[in-house]
Structures are given as structure tokens and as C-alpha cells.
Amino acid sequence: MSLRVRGPRAQRFVDLLGRYTGLTLVLDHEMVSIDRNSLLIPSESQTLQDLVEEIVHSPNVVEVVAFGGVPDPMLNIDTFLAMPEFHRPRRSVYVADLEEIERMSPILARGLMGHILREYYGASRPPGQQPSEAYADNHVAAMRTEAQIVGDLLDRPIWTGHVRPWEHTYGTINV
Ligand SMILES: [Zn+2]
């Protein structure tokens, strides 16, 4: 078991992840496990379900520190690296931001959840080792996962050409 969720909104994050995957997830002493008696919900994304299963059974430790997010008017969603100036540890996720996005687009919220988890999983390491700080590589891999999840939910294939569909980065925004 190696999805470690802590922080003031840990339970809310796990509840959200359970809803987005259709899996019954249990948070106990910061560790997430999957209740084997849970019924799978076929309308949710298989890619996201598989990712969560893989993380939960991985020897690596995938960390999430769950915070609220409001009243900050910005949608920050998450921060991969620590931001000491804002007293935020690495892998901070803002649950209220995800919930706000979900109100606008439930599919995008699921895609972003998968993006976050793929990015953190890619950077994770076994217990006792420092996780990777390589943001860019893991971020690009996460965009593919995000596209796959959205593709699952819309029943559309993702782009498979040589040019990535997210071709430009303006500052911190990928287009
Ligand atoms: Zn990213």
C-alpha cells in the first residue's frame, strides 16, 4: 500500500478519488487501500481505475498533501514542488479547486485527478528515498494520462500523431 494522503483535507481527497474511480477507498493512518468488496462502476474511467490500483500496489510511495483551496481566488489545483514561501510542502493538492472544476466539467476534473496522480507516481521512489524533483518529464507523461481519461469518458480516441495536442506552454499554462 503506497498511496499516502495526509493534510487537512485528506479524507475529502480520498472521497473525491473514490467517486472519480468508482472504487471504494479506505484511508487509514494516511495510507489508502481499496476495499475488495466494492462494486466497480463501469461508467468511470478504466485508465484512472488502473492507475489508482497500480499506485496502491506499487513499492514506491506516492505522496499527496490535501488542502482546501478557498478563499484563494486562483485555481491552483496542485503544486508539485514545495513552496516554502507559502508554507506548502511538495505534492500539495487543493481539493476545493478540483471540486470547483468538477462543477464546470466532471470529465475535466477526472482528467486532472489522473494528471496529478500520474505526475506524482512518475516522481515517486521507494520508502526512505527522496522522490524525484523532475517536474517537466512527469508533467508531459501526465498529460497523456489526462487525455486517455478524458478519451475513456467521452469514448473518443486520443491523438496519436507525432505532434502533441498540447503544443505550447505559455508560462505555466499548457495549450
Ligand atoms: Zn502537470
Image (tube, rainbow, N blue to C red):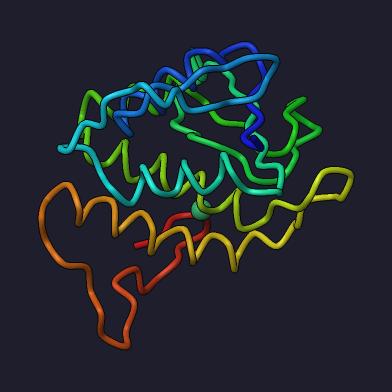
Q: Is residue 23 left or right of residue 3?
A: left
The foreground one among 105 and 3 is 3
- Where is 58 relative to 4, above or below? below
Q: Is residue 1 left or right of residue 171?
A: right
- Residue at left 49%, top 21%? 13
In which quadrant of the rendered view does residue 108 lie? top left
Q: Quadrant of the N terminus?
A: top right
Q: Is residue 147 left or right of residue 90?
A: left
Q: Quadrant of the C terminus?
A: bottom left
Q: Is residue 91 left or right of residue 75?
A: right
- Where is 175 relative to 99, above or below? below
The foreground one among 25 and 79 is 25
Q: Residue furthest right?
A: 128
What x and y, as percent, mark residue 173? Answer: 44, 55
- Residue at left 38%, top 43%? 112
What x and y, as percent, mark residue 169? Answer: 45, 66
Q: Residue furthest bottom?
A: 162
Q: Residue furthest front?
A: 37
- Residue at left 39%, top 21%? 24
Labels in figure, total: 0
- Where is 86 relative to 138, above or below? above
- Residue at left 72%, top 28%? 88
What x and y, as percent, mark residue 81? Answer: 71, 45
